Image (cartoon, rainbow, N blue to C red):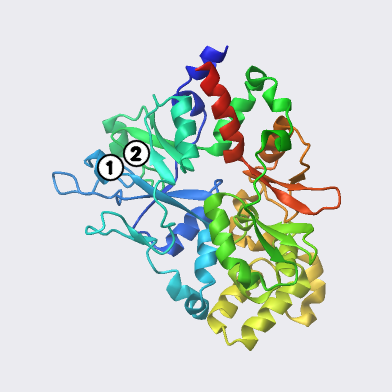
Amino acid sequence: MAVRLLSHELSDLCLGKPALRSLSVTSTIAEALEVLKTSDDNFVSVWSCDHKAKTSSGFESAAGFCDNYDDDDCRCVGKVCMVDVICYLCKDENLVSPSVALKEPVSVPSVALKEPVSVLLPKIPGLVLHVEPSCSLLEAIDLILEGAQNLVVPIKTKLSNKRKQHQKPSPTVTVHKGREFCWLTQEDVIRFLLSSIGLFSPVPAFSIDTLGIISSEILTIEYHSPASAAIGAISRTLVDQTSVAVVDSEGCLIGEISPFTLACCDETVAAAVKTLSSGDLMAYIDCGGPPEDLVRVVSSRLKERNLNGMLEHFSMSMSYGGFSSSSSDEESMAASPLPRSGRYSRSMSYSARMVRRAEAIVCHPKSSLVAVMIQAISHRVNYVWVIEDDCSLVGIVTFSDMLKVFREHLETIA
């Protein structure tokens, strides 16, 4: 059985995975928003090609197909999510005029640097890597432990050239030389290992404390501190696939500001981040929807700071979601629910997604490895906070920490 597990290739993990929705590096941030708001995935892949390349005869090929591109000219160079856009709009110059800021390109190709220059993509190489379907499970785990978050894997399609000519253009699907692509994440690998957890016995029954995988490297912010003070930490935890812990004055965990939760919001949450305390922001982004009083607070503070561009954008968002900040509309407010987490434009896909609450997912130092794995997977997060009985924060356990344990065990049976 152990040998059989080691014989698996990434193609085995790709079964049933949806094809990637994609953007060109030259797409605007507004175009990225449009794709994100209609996607069932929190992330959208960004590619170096424009998917509208001209054929040898001079005509444009169908959007989404890059049959005339060499492998090196059509690659996934990164990924973006709603949190990237929120942090981008939190910059003072972008709050003044969000409509102008959203017209900027996601990334600008640079021949000199051989890498796209981006306002959204993290400037950390190796977060997204291309691999072949024949890549082994062990090789994939090693790449993840080296820093990769998404492994882009080609999947064969059965579209004939004739069919492609008659197919409607799809600007959000990448097809290169007859192949679409999917990507594998840390969660996919952990789920796969969980399906064969018995092979690792007795390790999964050991406590996370015994295994030594509780990390004390965490980012925290005090409950009453301005949420804007956490913008840098939010960006970092997005890259680390963790979260910002919200604690009280004694270091006890109260909740979190999680990129996984923010990804279920819309871009106007940037206004809340810049105007509310950390504690109020948690209430604002909770899946029940922003409280009426906090919506009014955000509007009032935007007006006080003369951030008229963001105020207009924010007011349109609330109005579209059925909310009016006017006190005379309290009766109509009761009949029209608030837009959940500000995600008014994603209502069509909202029911199909798991929307996170701001409540932190926690375990104890004596919790078993398998129990923590199941906790993280069931809540669709890459980490679990570790606390003592009095709620004092001990640290965090991540998928990466868990994979190190399984990698060591696989080394012994390889």
Q: Position of residue 180 (x, y in %)?
A: 38, 35
Label disc, if present, on residue 175 of the rendered structure: 2
Q: CA distance from mark 1 to mark 2?
A: 6 Å
Q: Name the secondary structure under disc 1.
A: loop
Q: Is residue 154 left or right of residue 382?
A: left
Q: Amino acid at mark 1?
A: Cys
Left or right of 363, for residue 114 = left
Precedes in sequence: disc 1 or disc 2: 1
Residue pushed farthest right?
Answer: 390
Type of amino acid at the residue the image marks with label 2: Val
Q: Residues within 10 Å of mark 1 (few under 14, many from 20)?
A: many
The residue that label 1 is drawn on is 66
Q: Quadrant of the N terminus?
A: top right
Viewer-nearest residue: 130 or 197: 197
- Residue 218 in percent (x, y) is at 64, 54
Q: Position of residue 243 (x, y in %)?
A: 63, 54
Residue sitting at the far left: 57
- Helix, strand or loop at disc 2? strand
- The residue under the point 40% across, 27% down is 133
